Structure formats: structure tokens, C-alpha cells
Image: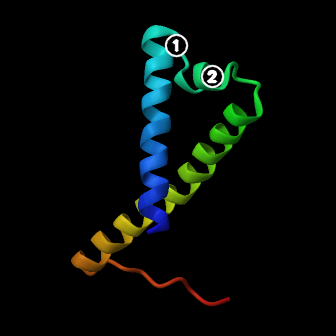
Amino acid sequence: MVKKLALAITIIGALNWGVVGLFSFDVVAQLANGNAQPFARFFYIIVGVSGLITLGLLFDTLREKQLEHGAVVEPEEV
């Protein structure tokens, strides 16, 4: 559930940055009356943390593909 919520927040953040890139309009800053406002900063932090959480999904997917193909290599013990 947390990973799905993090993914949704990451997608919303990515769409916001897409709008910033295309139209030079920051939706979050507009809603918060400026990008330095506490709400905007909080949202930017939440998007960043969500991005880190969803980064784990990438590695989960890679691990699953390796298991499907039987290409898992166990790390050597030192």
C-alpha cells in the first residue's frame, strides 16, 4: 500500500515538473502561494521521499526478472 501511494505521488510530482518544463508554471507553487511556502516545500519533500521509495520498485522488478531467467548470482562471503 505504501509503495502504491508513493508511486502515485511520484507520478503527480513528475506531471507537475512536466508542466513546469512545458509552460513555466508550477502548480504546487501556485496552490501554495509561492514555492518557498511551507506547504510547497512539504510537498516537494514528500515527492522526493516517494521517489526514493519507488526506486525500490525498480530493483524489485529487476530481481524478479533475474529469478524468472534463473540468473541470480549469490554474493560471495568474505
Q: Residues within 10 Å of mark 2 (few under 14, many from 20)?
A: some
Q: Position of residue 16 (x, y in %)?
A: 48, 28
Which residue is depicted at the point 59% across and 19% down?
30
Q: Position of residue 62 (x, y in %)?
A: 36, 65
Instruction: Name which residue lies at 32% across and 73% down.
Output: 64
73 with respect to 34 (left or right): left
Please provide percent x and percent y for residue 58.
42, 59
> Which of the two residues, 76 or 39, is positioned nearer the viewer here?
39
Question: What residue is disc 2 on?
Answer: 29
Q: In the rendered view, would you say 72 is above or below 30?
A: below
**Secondary structure under the numbered disc 2 in the rendered image:** helix
Q: Which mark is residue 25?
A: 1
* Residue situated in front as seen by the camera: 20 or 27: 27
In this rendering, the answer to whether 19 lies above or below 23 is: below
Amino acid tagged 2: Ala
Q: CA distance from mark 1 to mark 2?
A: 8 Å
